[in-house]
Amino acid sequence: MMVKDAIIVLAMCLDPDGELDELARCRARRAYDLFLDGVAEWIIVSGNVGHELPYRPYRTEAAAMKEYMISLGVDEKSIILEEISKDTMGNAFFTRRDILEPNGWKNIVVVTSDFHMPRTIYLFDKIFGRDYDITFEEADSQVAPAEMARLLLEERRISILVTGWLDNIDDGDSHALKTFLKIKHPEYSRHKELFSSKMIT
C-alpha cells in the first residue's frame, strides 16, 4: 500500500463508564497495524458519542480510542481527534472539513469493522467525491455468527435510511451535503452552530 496522508479510524461503542468494547478495540488494533507498517504518519480518530445511545459517557469515543492506541504504542503526537461526529456520516463530513481540508490531505485510508464497511464506503464516497484517493481497510470483528447476523441486520436497516436521504445528492457535492446535515439530519440539525464558522465551500 502506498504511503497515505492519514489513517482515519472510526470510533465506536463506549459503555456508560466510558470504556471501549471489543469491537472498537479491533478497529484500533487494525489502525495500529497499518501505522506500524508505515502506511501513514498520522492517525485520525473520529467520533463523539453515538446519538442513539441512551446514556452519555464522560468522554468521547475518540478520546477513549486515543488512550487505547497510546497503550498499544502509538505516540500521542501522531494522533488527531475529531470529536464532533455522532455517526458515520458525521465521521466523513467533519473529518474532511476540519482536518483533511485545512492540511491539504487527499490520500487517506479508512479503518472500520467488517460488518460496517459497506455503509462506510457509501458515505465516504458520497461525501468525499472523486477529489480524494481513499483506501478502505476492515477490522475483523471476531464475533460469533449469531452476533454478526444481528450486526448485519442493523446495518441493513441504517443503510436503507441513509441511502434514502443521500442517493439524490451527487458524490462530493459539499454544499448539498452540508445543507442536508444542517437542515434535515435528526442530530446535527439541532446544532446549527456546527456550521456557522467552518464551512466547506
Image (tube, rainbow, N blue to C red):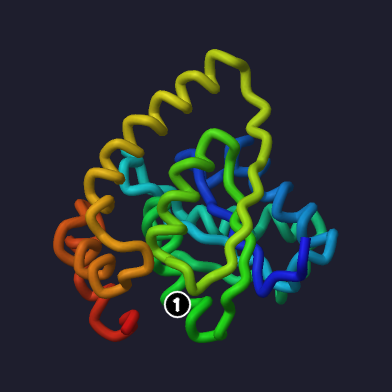
Name the foreground residue: 36 vs 64.
Answer: 36
> What residue do we see at 52% from left, 77% from top?
100
- Please rate how many residues cluster around mark 1, counting C-alpha atoms within 10 Å: few if below 14, some from 14 to 19, many from 20: some
**Left or right: 177, with 40 as reference point:** left
Relative image position of residue 182 (x, y in whole percent):
20, 67
Image quarter where the N terminus lies is bottom right
Looking at the rendering, which quadrant does residue 41 occupy? bottom right
Relative image position of residue 13 (x, y in whole percent):
50, 41
Mark 1 residue element: helix
Relative image position of residue 171 (x, y in whole percent):
36, 63
Relative height, residue 141 to residue 39 (above, below): above
Relative height, residue 182 to residue 14 (above, below): below
**Left or right: 155, with 192 as reference point:** right
> What residue do we see at 29% from left, 45% from top?
162
- The residue positioned farthest toward the right in the image shown: 37
Amino acid type at circle 1 is Asp
> What residue do we see at 64% from left, 32% from top?
141
Relative height, residue 83 to residue 160 (above, below): below
Relative image position of residue 164 (x, y in whole percent):
23, 44
Image quarter where the C terminus lies is bottom left
Q: According to the image, label 1 marks what residue?
A: 98
**Left or right: 188, with 98 as reference point:** left
Total numbered badges shown on the rendered structure: 1
> What residue do we see at 26% from left, 40% from top?
161
- The residue positioned farthest toward the left in the image shown: 183
